[in-house]
Amino acid sequence: MIRAPTSAGETARLVSLSASDLFGISKDYVFDCITNIGAQLFNAPVCSLVLADADQHWFNSRAAPDIRETFRNKSFCNDVVADSEPMVIEDTLLDVRFAGDLLLSIAPQIRFYAGRPIRGSSGAVLGTLCLLDFKPRDFPPEQQELLQELVFLTELSLFTRGITSAQQALVAKLSVARHESLIDPLLRIWNRGGITTILNQQHESSREQRVPFSILMADIDHFKQINDRHGHITGDSVLKAVIGVLQSVMRVDDELGRYGGEEFIAILPNTNAASAEELARRLNESVAELSVDTPTGSVGCTVSIGVAEWTPTRAESVQALVYRADDALLSAKQDGRNRVHLSSRAA
């Protein structure tokens, strides 16, 4: 038995095969169509798309008996992959290259083989499209050309799959980048653009479902004095500590975003004004108990909160809702700070 030597470009070929992302696909409709057409077109009992891994050949798609894989050095396809050239064996028993081949001693005995290399977009051979028969047969040039046309369709499908995979990877990267662009880098909560986007989505969802939702507008009292007295590093620590307290009190479905330097918006889905006000008071009390250790001593703070409810009975824009919450926040500050005020227009 004479075998073709391993190609010098085997490593690059295996890299291209791995990049094709074909392994692990149990069924592929397009590839199954190609092998089914091949089996019927050539009246062959076996037509397979075979991927040539380092040690094994994998039958990615096959119109054949239940053959799943063979060791690569025992497969006719190995020669096609190694030579990167088509191969036709009209009678395996008459071909000296395969004298004593183990495959010829296994029932049903393979007597005919026709295989052509399948190339990826880089030009590397990924495997073969092959025909098998259990009796000798002629395979004239016109049939070889038809098999090559099926190879062309297979390679076209691989190319399309590669574009799709690249597009999906790009979309995933863009999604991550888009998400990061909406996150506050210091506090790791939504920034103004992010929380505004969430607020618009919540408004649309509540309008369609005809359910209320509420927002809280919170501001850290006298935060500028904290920065001026203790420095911006301490100020950042206070911001993070306040966010930690707010997140610990808020519910799973609530959303929190940084609307300004020390001003935050919380979105409370399916929440009326009374429930929102109750949650706001818990937030207010929890922040008032906060103590942040710094090199210059412990620093505490308080927050003022304005509450506004959106109801489906009144056609109110997001901008109008935010204005009402901000107005309630201003009222809480004017009343002495460390207060919760409910928008007077909330129903």
Image (tube, helix red, strand yellow):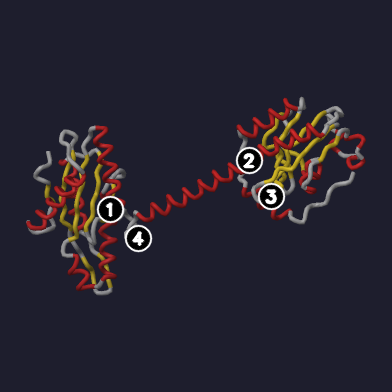
Measure the C-alpha gap from mark 1 to mark 4: 12 Å
Q: Could you say whether the residue bearing mark 4 is in a helix, strand or loop?
A: loop
**Front label number (4 vs 2):** 2
Residue 257 tag number: 1
User: In the image, what residue occupies the spot 69% across and 45% down?
Assistant: 119
Measure the C-alpha gap from mark 1 to mark 3: 50 Å
Q: Could you say whether the residue bearing mark 1 is in a helix, strand or loop?
A: strand
Circle nearer the N terminus (4, 3): 3
Q: Kindly indicate whether the residue at mark 3 contacts the one at mark 4 (C-beta within 8 angstroms).
A: no
Task: List x then y, in percent, for residue 229.
Answer: 20, 73
- Residue on which disc 4 sits: 185
Q: Quadrant of the N terminus?
A: top right
Q: Is residue 230 above or below residue 144?
A: below
Left or right, 57 with reference to 230:
right
User: In the image, what residue occupies the spot 33% across and 62% down?
Assistant: 186
Q: Nearer the viewer, residue 47 or 298?
A: 47
Give the amino acid type for the residue marked by disc 4 in the picture.
Answer: Pro
Query: How many labels were placed on the picture?
Result: 4
Circle nearer the N terminus (2, 3): 3
- Residue on which disc 2 sits: 156
Q: Is residue 243 above or below residue 77?
A: below
| Quadrant of the rendered image containing residue 224 | bottom left
Give the amino acid type for the residue marked by disc 3 in the picture.
Answer: Gly
Q: Kindly indicate whether the residue at mark 4 contacts the one at mark 1 (C-beta within 8 angstroms).
A: no
Q: Could you say whether the residue bearing mark 3 is in a helix, strand or loop?
A: loop
User: In the image, what residue occupies the spot 72% across and 34% down?
Assistant: 48
Mark 3 burial class by Cα count in 10 Å: few <14, some 14-19, many 20+: few
